[in-house]
Image (tube, rainbow, N blue to C red):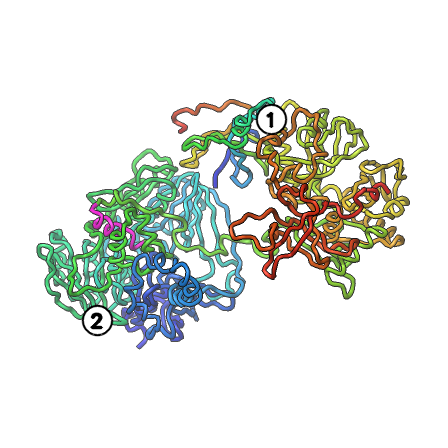
Amino acid sequence: MKEAFRLPSPAGRPIRFVFDGVAYQGREGDTLATALLANGVHLVGRSYKYHRPRGILSAGPEEPNALVAVHRGPGRMTPNLRATQVELYEGLEATSQNRWPSLALDVGVVNDLASRFFSAGFYYKTFMGPKAAGTALWTKVFEPIVRQAAGLGERPHDPDPDRYAQFHAHCDVLVCGGGPAGIAAALVAGRAGKDVILCDEQAAFGGSLLHETTALIDGKPARDWLADALSDLAGRTNVRLLARTQAFGYYAQNFVALSERVADHRPAGSSAVRERLWQVRANKVVIATGAIERPLVFPGNDRPGVMLAEAARCYLNRYGVKVGARVVIATAHDSAYRVARDLMAAGVDVAAIADCRAVVPESVLEMAQAAGLRVIRAATVAGTRGRLRITAAGLSSVVDGVVASPEWIACDCLLMSGGWTPSVHLHSQSRGKVVWNDDRQMYLPGVPVQDEQSAGACRGLFGLGDVLMDGLSAGARAAGLSGQPRPVTVCGDSGTEGGILGRLPWRHDLAGPSFVDFQNDVKADDIDLAVQEGMRSIEHIKRYTTTGMATDQGKTSNLNALAIAAGRLGKTIPEVGLTTFRQPYTPVTFGAFAGASRGELFDPVRKTPIHRWASEYGAVFEDVGLWKRARYFPRPGEDMHAAVDRECRQARLSAGLFDASTLGKIEVVGPDAARFLERMYTNSLAKLEPGRCRYGLMLNEAGFVMDDGIIARLAADRFHVTTTTGGAARVLNHMEDYLQTEFTDLRVWLTSTTEQWAVIAVQGPRARDILQPLVEGFDIARQAMPHMSVREGTVCGIPARVMRVSFTGELGYEINVPADFGRAVWDAVWAAGRSHDAVAYGTEAMHVLRAEKGYIIVGQETDGTVTPDDLGLTWAIGKAKPDFVGKRSLVRPDMLARDRKQLVGLLTDTPGTVLEEGAQITAPAHPKIGDAALGFVTSSYTSPVLGRSIALALVAAGRSRKGERLHVPMPGGALAVTVVDPVFFDPEGDRVHG
Amino acid sequence: MLLIHCPYCQMDRPETEFRNGGEAHVARPADPMAASDDEWAGFLYYRSNPRGLHAERWRHTHGCGRFFNCLRDTVSDRIVTTYKAGTMRPVPAPEAL
């Protein structure tokens, strides 16, 4: 029968949905949980470790059991959603999780039978494994089985097709939680004209007012008062109402993160955006997050049909759903009595109410008596029966700590209330302390650290009148109003008290698993065991048992776990401590955090002015930082090896063109520019003439190489400095740091010009011939413009700075032209080059050409622990300079040690063998385990000009080992190598002067 | 995300515009070569790492580009004040703490 548990004449229109392949009918306004309960379905999942049948426990975001996967088409499967929050729409398709082959018949339930092996610390005890024999067995056999069996939902496999937005917002008052306290606060602040944001996790605002049927507020039924209040708020332009929006994180300076579900309550594809991440900076925050009802801890408290009491009232009064036909209630709190009253009024058979308290307030008992409720005082639940649904509850009285033999009462639902836990999460995340209130046995918000206040149930107020007044006062304070807000009058809600923490009294002959943390399958016994095995701090107990570590972060379990641990340790709860309330309050999708930063928008892409030419010419690109650089230019039929081989040979034979635009460039200007650079670079620069260039080596203060480049002096007070491609921003920051904070007396200005200049390198014996006809305004003849000089003039009529520099060991020039002209000049140089058989070469050939010459690349031959001397670059140090950054460090004892790793060349015995970069180097072919390596390979290539492989390496005392044979142990056997000078080609260096 | 007051721009700007530059008021010795190995190591590597108020450098990297100093509480992550580079570490008023 459709919706057998729905009250007659339901409001919403019917909606069809599918759960685990079965079609059901629900109602508009339902959640998946309410719709299933309306159809009498309690069994919705299997538990994490033991695969025990589990039902719906709660009616809110604290739900630990009813986790489902919702399927909304390809890429739109979301696992681990709480059925209590999933809003129903036409055609919704959901499945249960962690069961095979089906929910009712789950093979994994053998874990339950073996549960004594899965006790506290199971993971620590077993996954460590016996060291020798067991490890392989564990990683190959047991661990996959256990991992398969344990767990929650599956991850989605397809890319997420949805879009996610991110909003930044500012407001005077942010109210987190749209229950009575939050609405009251928003009303006051809104009426005072403040810019207010009110957010609530649910589709409808109102919180507990949405299922309040008896109370009157200012003489009106609660729901009418709510409707009026919401229409008041909605009519104000200064109030933003964000429904379906969870305040999930409270960060520094009243920065609160909200996650808004925009699309998931409608069929897929009906909204442009799925979720919005709100980053709100609020002047004042009102936290009105309510309280969460606590389960009772007794044997068999996890059977489907065992629910939190107030959830049943919510389902009944708000959704018109009866959670069962015959209900037993177990409680330690007054609030469950109004649950019983409302259920009875709706025709549900409430068989008995077992109150754990010996003393129950008279007013409560009178109400029970008037309703004809059977009350058992000083009672406990000794056990439950039933497999896929509870069939009976065993209620016992407790006398002097002795639990009597139970009376078994048939039921299809057991409602429980251990009292209420204020939701202090946001207050705690804001770094406010929470304070234990011993009288009320609850943690309450302490003194605020940020500009926030808690209002209502989240600070322990449970009477509706108190809650509303507290919300009004909080709103007034947040709005800066001095007077007291006009009080509201509430009838029919006298407030409730009570509560119990920890495990109920139990009988040893009826022992069964008493669950504390439902989602992570942690039992009271596990916490006992953890204490018995020596855990003392709640942080240790938590990690050992995993209590509170599931996706619900222990919203329903933490206090019970604490109380059990405290009882075992003979300490008070505050002595045992409290674990941290971490963000997010409920899980947030990765999509919301990523926002638009996906795919092409994940990172900016930097392209040079010559990029399009390279692309048209067939370049294969590589990522260098954010830059796209042409790696090589394959001709038809060529692979990378063939292309690089051709590019290298031709560059040395005639010439090669290379796009060097990505080089970092800094214009250093000012009367003290030379003095400044003298201090920033190791080199002597004071006497560098205008028109000349020098290789520049930059150290950090610790004496390690951090960058290198060319320093070109254009005038007495102007330098054009280049940096490595990846180091540009770092070098400028480093220079600015010293200029602003150490060498403040120097008159120097620094400007990043990286993107202002396109750089075309022309390298090779024919470079001058290519360039000659294009140059005007200066003489590039061999003598007139020697190696390491710079000239300003025009190239192809475009103002240019031309440097005669070489990173190939060949005669070479680097033409700098304004970026907008880069492509045009490249085209002209390329056309000129073609008549001299020039090639275009990419970064791969550039690497090979420079390695043949033993030129280092910072970041490849260096790793932040390499000194100039290690690289054989002491010639680049101005010895006479009194100071430069890093100078003092170069004479620290460790920097002078003889066994420092030094740059050398390596030649393999077999010329065709190319070593792996990063491979370790040892003296013997078969080093003993534990012996340190002598060094490692930093660069390794096939050298076309030498017709064999070459490698650069850092090797301990390497320069003294020339001619020595060493080994590179590899999985296939050690490779024998000979230590040589790092300059493999043209060691005399004649070619650059060609 | 912190809001940081740039003493040059005279504006509160989000943390993502800034970069932390380590402890402030660690002066580079005027004549490094005259420093002993221990003194130099102290300058390079030893920092106060306090629990509580910490004077540290920040740079408004994606703003004016200036380095400035900041007093931040390392326990609460609260910034008590920011001040220009080259000025003395201020003594915050008790009510600012």
Q: x, y (%) of residue A869?
A: 66, 36
Query: Which image quarter is the C terminus of chain A in?
Result: top right
Q: Which residue is mark 1?
A: A742
Front residue of A132/A547: it is A132
Mark 1: few/some/many CA within 10 Å (<14, 14-19, 20+) = some
Asked if residue A569 is among those painted magenta in the image, a careful observer would answer yes
Q: Which residue is mark 2?
A: A391
Determine whether the residue tagged by mark 1 lies in a helix, strand or loop: loop
Amino acid at the residue labelled 1: Glu
Q: What range is drawn magenta here?
A: A555-570
* Chain letter belonging to callout 2: A
**Can see residue B64?**
no
Number of marks? 2
Q: x, y (%) of residue A649?
A: 81, 54
Q: x, y (%) of residue A600?
A: 61, 55
Q: x, y (%) of residue A478?
A: 37, 38
